[in-house]
Amino acid sequence: MFLYEVFPPELIKIGLESDDKDEVFEELVDQFCQAEKSNAREEILEALREREAKMSTGIQKGIAVPHGKTNAINNVRGVLGISKKGIDYDALDGQPVYLLFMLLAPQKDSEKHLRLLKRLAGLLDNPQFYTELVSQTDPQAAHGVIKKYEDIFISSY
């Protein structure tokens, strides 16, 4: 499974309205539930909050990777949120977050979940990926950036 499959254009939200972590979780989960026609909103929010309570997923400058596992979904999915103003996320570096890669997986897909987190970490090691992605103004273009950098990442191995 590829990241560009996990984050299709209908699961990319540009211009997040949220100001803080709790609000952005709700905004991203609402995007997911609307696009996937899911009624698992509360179960997904609970999985994200449970994981976040262990340690902030605001992992590096301007980036957060909230993730959780729940049997309320059938396969690994994600929502990418891009904020132009920044979100108070309680990130490890104390700085606002502009890119949020929410990754959701069923309990049984732990291995796939971890592989995708590892691949995402590889893409995030490239500062050009962040710079290009955060400047996108429409979901289709943002999806294209993910595919472009994932192809580069895969071909380097």
Image: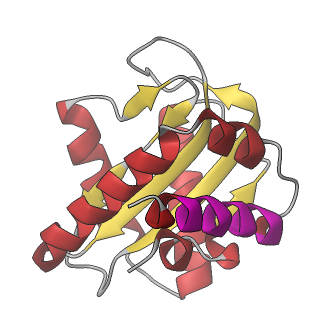
Q: Nearer the viewer, residue 55 or 136?
A: 136
Determine the main secondary structure of the stretch shown in magenta: helix
Task: Relative to 22, say whether 150 is above or below.
Answer: below
Q: Nearer the viewer, residue 29 or 9?
A: 9
Give the image's coloring scheme. Answer: secondary structure
Q: Is residue 74 visible?
A: yes
Q: Quadrant of the C terminus?
A: bottom left
Q: Residue furthest top?
A: 94
| 145 within the magenta span | yes
Please provide percent x and percent y for residue 103: 39, 60
Write the start and end of the magenta stretch as one range: 140-152
Give the residue displayed 88% in from the left and 54% down from the top. Answer: 137
Q: Is residue 16 visible?
A: no
In the picture, residue 7 is in which quadrant? Answer: bottom right
| 138 within the magenta span | no
In the picture, measured across the screen, residue 1 lies left or right of residue 32, that is left
In the picture, measured across the screen, residue 35 lies left or right of residue 106, that is right
Give the residue displayed 63% in from the left and 52% down from the top. Answer: 81
In the picture, measured across the screen, residue 55 lies left or right of residue 103, that is left
Please provide percent x and percent y for residue 128: 68, 39
In the picture, measured across the screen, residue 134 lies left or right of residue 78, that is right
Task: Relative to 86, say whether 134 is above or below.
Answer: below
Give the residue displayed 61% in from the left and 78% down from the top. Answer: 34
Give the residue displayed 54% in from the left and 88% down from the top. Answer: 37
Please provide percent x and percent y for residue 100: 55, 45
In the picture, residue 39 is in which quadrant? Answer: bottom left
